[in-house]
Amino acid sequence: MTYATVMVSLALDQPNQARLQVAGELAERYEATLVGVAAARFAPPLYFTDGAEAQRLIDQEEASVKRCLGDLEAEFRAATRTRGGRVEWRCATDFPTRFVLAQARCADIIVSGGQSPAFSDAFSLASPRDLVMQVGRPLLVVPDRINWLDLRNVLVAWKDTPEARRAVADALPMLRKARDVTIATIPEHDDDRSVVMAGVTDVAAWLARHGVTATARVCEGDRNETAAAQLEKVAGDVDAGLIVAGAYGHSRFRELILGGVTQYLVTQTARSVLLSH
């Protein structure tokens, strides 16, 4: 498995340098096509008018959206000008999440910026919180402070679920290039530690058959700490530059409300994160 097409989602009124840098590196590493995508829509005002004045306002705001999309294309072209390989740009006056979800059909991996804990504007930003449960591709979340794809130490946050299994399989091209890989799991209070360790060891053995040497680890954290806090400690211990994890939501509202660890992963600012659902 490799990445033949890398897609990067750009946002209005957000820093895009980090995600462009990492997406470009990823495309170069795997000799992949790099596709830039962006979309935005005119956000209706909180007040109303009618007639010619209303049409003038609509025309003005739609023209502004188109100018902003043109600026994003120029930013994408400038960032990829010196990189080898094929590049492509796609944009639309549409809701960003809807547009990116549709375009993702042509990509192997999607690169997105990190998610601010604050409210996100659905008219100008396809946030990872919106994408992760629906995109059907691995999502690489790149916080704004990241300036390169650090694969020296990779942490796999293991949970014996279909989502985590998909995430490890989706991450194989990157895991093969990592210097050190740690597979860590945080057991539930009533889990049998030997059974949990056997499961993590199985994952390490599976990776070994794919040319990846990994260390298995069962975390012994404070029971009063959240799983997210324990995961952050492990990531710090191994100096992880990338975390690989399954993405989880709360059953009935999974497109809108993320689980605690997934919410932490899309909002933390220290490391890139590869998520699969």
Image (cartoon, rainbow, N blue to C red):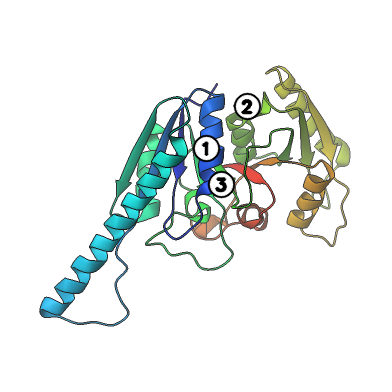
Around disc 3, counting alpha carbons within 10 Å, would you say few (fewer than 14), some (14 to 19), or many (20 or more)?
many
Q: Are marks 2 and 1 in contact (CB under 8 Å)?
A: no
On screen, residue 13 above or below 136:
below
Q: Is residue 131 left or right of residue 37?
A: right
* 119, 251: nearer the viewer: 119
Which image quadrant is residue 73 in? top left
Residue located farthest toward the left when viewing the structure as drawn = 52
Give the CA distance from mark 3 to mark 1.
Answer: 9 Å
Which image quadrant is residue 25 in? top right
Amino acid at pointer 2: Leu
Q: Label 2, on which residue?
A: 172
Q: Label 3, on which residue?
A: 18
Give the CA distance from mark 2 to mark 1.
Answer: 17 Å
Amino acid at pointer 3: Ala
At x 67%, y 25%, the residue is 177
Mark positioned earlier in the residue sequence (3 or 1): 3
* 92, 277: nearer the viewer: 92
